[in-house]
Amino acid sequence: MMKLRSKHFLSGAELDRGELDGVLKLAETLRSERARGAPRRDLERKHVALVFEKPSLRTRVSFTVAVQELGGQVVELSSIGRKKEEPEDTVRVLEGYVHAMMLRTHEHSILERMVAKSAIPVINGLSDTHHPCQALADVLTLEQEYKALKGVKLAYVGDGNNVLHSLLLIAPFLGVDLSYACPKGFEPHSFIVNQAKARAKEGGGDVRAFVDPTAAVKGADAIYTDVWTSMGFEQEETDRDTVFAPYRLDRELHSHAAKDAIVMHCMPMIRGKEISDEMADHPRSALFRQSENRLHVQKALLLGLMRGI
């Protein structure tokens, strides 16, 4: 895989079609190599800072293992273990020590301020607006299941949050037909939807919006959901539970999709809320394959961003 043209990865829209296809192809190669126990030393003598301003399980472990299995070293920082300073100053300090950084944060503007001053690659491990590493893992999961992404019907039901934003920007651009259903007042940002529709036209996919979750999932090859209350919105949880109840991914909703539709969730999940136990453990559940695929796509992303550093 050649070095990616973009130095940074914040939303997924930085990569063109060929680059996204290349990341997915390399991720699958890396998955196979790992299964065979084939070692890699691409990041030998390289250090990557993992900076966490939000709690993490999948992002922390998958990035740590990714860097280490590529021969690199990880430096982990949390918000409680360092003093607060301006994002521009933080990244300029880190670039004197490490060769790349991943940030899991709140406002997306923090990442944008960092990349404006950064001499090293910056990867968005999650922000309030985007979760692009998760979307990469999701399209890899779809590709593993259906072999080709063109024409795959993906339905998302629930909150119009960072996960949906990233799916919108990446999946239709790769040929996926994405339908989503969100309650009124909880739709994705309009400027992201407009960008996604333009990218879908270029990439051969489609974007369709619904309010009725049953209409959104009709004939879908995959149904995706996420928590109803993301980090930072806990004070709204009781009200959201009422609004989102009709959007629960359960047997009845799944029955309106294609017969063998897979079930998707980025996790962590709250069983019995946005997804039933039955669907989480369904024979067609892809949840844990999605979480594993975080490791493989992030390895590919690190290689593409850090090649030649």
Image (spheres, rainbow, N blue to C red):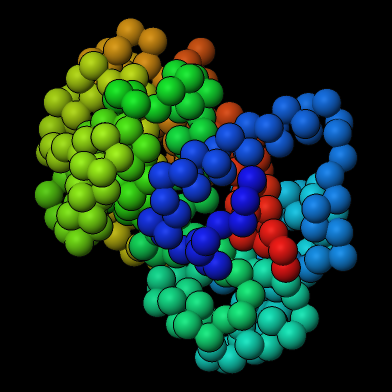
Question: In the figure, is residue 96 to the left or right of 234?
Answer: right
Nearest to the observer: residue 89 or residue 24: 24
Where is 81 relative to 250, above or below? below
Say which quarter of the image contains residue 53: bottom right
Q: Quadrant of the C terminus?
A: bottom right
Residue 286 is situated, as x and y percent measured from the top left of the image, at: 51, 25
Residue 43, visible in the rendered structure: yes
Question: In the figure, is residue 299 to the left or right of 232?
Answer: right
Question: In the figure, is residue 3 to the left or right of 227?
Answer: right
Residue at horizontal 45%, vertical 70%?
A: 106
Say which quarter of the image contains residue 226: top left
Residue 279, visible in the rendered structure: no
Question: In the figure, is residue 80 to the left or right of 154?
Answer: right
Nearest to the observer: residue 119 or residue 244: 119
Residue at horizontal 56%, vertical 64%?
A: 123
Residue 260 is situated, as x and y percent measured from the top left of the image, at: 39, 10
Residue at horizontal 16%, vertical 45%?
A: 183
Where is 228 relative to 259, above or below? below
Residue 257 is situated, as x and y percent measured from the top left of the image, at: 27, 17
